[in-house]
Image: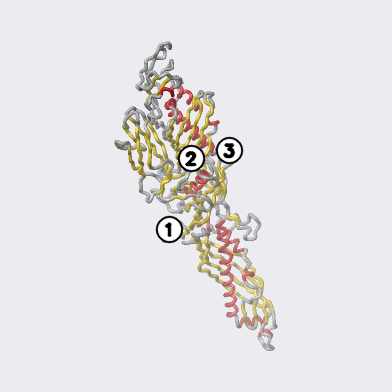
Amino acid sequence: MQLRNWIACLVLAGAGAACGDDDTANASGTDGETDSGTDTRDADSDATVSDSDSDTDSGSESDSNSDSEDSDGMRCEVAEDCDDGDPCTIDVCGEGGMCGTMEGDTVACRPEIDVEYPPRAATIQAKSPDETVTVTGTVTSLKGDIESLRINEDEVTVADDGSFSHDVTPSVGGNTLILETTDSAGQVRRRVQSFLWGTSYVKPTEPVEGMAPGGLAIYFSQEGIDDGDSSEPYNDLASLLGLAVGGIDFASLFAGNEPVANAAGFDIYLTSLDYQDTTLSLQAIDGGLALEAQIIDVDGDLVFDCVDEGLFSSCTLAGGDGTGGLDIDTITITADVMLSVDQESHELIVEIVNPNTDISNLEIYSNNWWTDFLLGLAGDAIIGGSVDDLEGAVNESLDTFLGPLLGEGLQNFNFSTSLDFPNIGNPDETITIDLITDFGDTDFHDGVAPPEPSPPQGGAIVLRGGGFADGEKAYEGLGFPLRNGCEVDPPAVNLTRTAVMEIGLHDDLINEILYGAWKGGLLEFPLPEELIPDSGLVSELDVTVSGMLPPVGMDCATGELLAHIGDIRIDASLNLLDAPVSFTAFTTAVVRVNITAEDGQIGIGIGDLESVHTELNVNEDSAIATEETLIGVLENALIDGLIGGLGGDSLGGIELPEIDLSDSLGLPPGTAVIAIQIEEAVRQPGVTVVQGSL
């Protein structure tokens, strides 16, 4: 039944009107089952009017059977004139204007559950993963003795003064407390509240403060690093670096005004250097990559400058200045490219270790036979000097060109972007979350122990991540708990390492995004009118929703990625047939978080409702009987509003980056590009792994 009809029907039931035989809405259950702890009797089911029957002669004076002498025989115009001082009776202005009382439930006389610790919407930081949370407080009732108290279905002992203390074993992330008490008068009362718990927290404030250390992990198998095929389309890192080696102007490595060698009275200058082909291979090793490049069939032009100008100098006798060339079969370059992260600046560090250049079969010749003869006499010295100079220049190019170029390529795997979340409170404007990433760690292996056991050959780069949005938080707290501290605490890089390449989206990064959305006002809105159809009986309806805790997605308790949306406060007021009705409710919902991988992006969405629990307290005695139905209808409207208003399966998407070195290599745009091809998304503890290829 529509919310307004239910309100009208059940509030009127408290005054003796009859309601239709409509099904009762889900009150506060889990997984679709009713979890009711509130007395659902009609307010008038056992009430007795103690003054006169409704058919008493209006002209005769009625006897009052009120338990209160103060109201006995009192004249009245409205019920407020008949206060008998007893909070457990309903004051009645009877027919004929005589005061009386009626037995029934009253707001003031219901059991009270006061939780001293933890406070509502608490963020609790534990010192160790095995700590418990001690729930303390008092429970009292004016109408009868407290007969039972349960906290999350556990029976709790209540002291004579109403105090209680009970240890709860929390899970990392969001936790719900459901307290239910019953008194000797049969009254049942429920309290629902939530808290966040963990051993470490982050609190995103402004870039880059409060970033999660394990945001994203990017993994390349050995095939993704180098599959041995450098043809287009390029699908590994080695292909791009091979383009880089092929684009090196080796002649520019030598200063044009400095000789590469000096022999037989000549200063020998290298004026050009060309080659027929290049190859490059990369092998993952512990800590980085082993690089080997070959430059094949090298030839260059030489100028011989006769500097010994004496009459009988060798170069003068050889004919003076001349030209020539050199031939090299192969130049082989090897180096270890070690990858790490500066933990202060969070920049990727590329360090060239053990560089070596080997020149195979170098020959120098001149266009003058006598010069050739003289060069032959000093050939070893000339060739040795030329080789040393050439090797030194090539080794230097590794540090100045290839190393930084590899670093630039890996830097392109940056997921910094913006996500626009729907704004339920203001549909004309979105909530923009800036996703910012930087480098956190590297993890490369050769596939051979140590370490024991060794991960497969390949490497991963871990990015920190943060979600930042404008706006001021409505509630303070520690932020949100990081996933570490779960019973199974995965390492920072928790990937399958079975695909050509993988992108691991850590649950902490999802929570960074959710926190940014919460800070931006995701859970601060009036419940839209269209979710509560008008019956004509209710007017001036005002329902305001306020999320006291940020949503937190975690798989620690169940192994499934679920988002806990806790202590959603709902304040509502309305007029029912011109009679004011108001209530305050607190709802906690658990929903699935769906991570998808398609159309070039990683999508984040809200899935099915797993559970919902609500505490609702009306402020008027006559509306007590409506609480359970209000809870059910309110939960339906709220959850429909949240899931529908937040876009359902698609809250937002993270665009996949690509490596593009075209500009750095002086090539046309789109020439030197590696793109990510998505195949599927699978779950690992704490991480959604998007598998694919390059």
Which one is nearer the viewer's eye here, 584 or 666? Answer: 584
Left or right side of 110 for 435: right
Residue at the (54%, 59%) spot, across then down: 228
Which one is nearer the viewer's eye here, 586 or 389? Answer: 586
Which one is nearer the viewer's eye here, 568 or 677? Answer: 568
- The residue beneath circle 3 is 427
**Front: mark 2 or 3:** 2
Instruction: Kindly identify the amino acid type of the residue bearing the numbered disc 3.
Output: Pro
Residue 622, x across and y down, in percent: 43, 25
Does 537 sit above or below residue 222? above
Would you call the spot at circle 2 few (<14 residues within 10 Å), some (14-19), or many (20 or more)? many
Q: Are marks 2 and 3 in contact (CB under 8 Å)?
A: no
The answer to whether residue 500 of the structure is visible from this angle is no
**Which mark is on residue 547?**
2
Q: CA distance from mark 1 to mark 2?
A: 45 Å
Name the secondary structure under disc 3: loop
Q: CA distance from mark 1 to mark 3?
A: 51 Å
Q: Looking at the image, which residue sits at the far bottom?
A: 312
Name the secondary structure under disc 2: strand
- The residue beneath circle 1 is 454
Does 42 sit above or below residue 403? above
Q: Are marks 1 and 3 in contact (CB under 8 Å)?
A: no
Does 622 sit above or below residue 357? above
Residue 259, x across and y down, in percent: 63, 77
Name the secondary structure under disc 1: loop
Quarter of the image holding residue 557? top left
Residue 40, x across and y down, in percent: 40, 26
Instruction: Kindly identify the amino acid type of the residue bearing the numbered disc 1.
Output: Ser
Residue 462, x across and y down, in percent: 49, 55
| Mark 2 or mark 3, earlier in chain | 3
**Front: mark 1 or 2:** 2
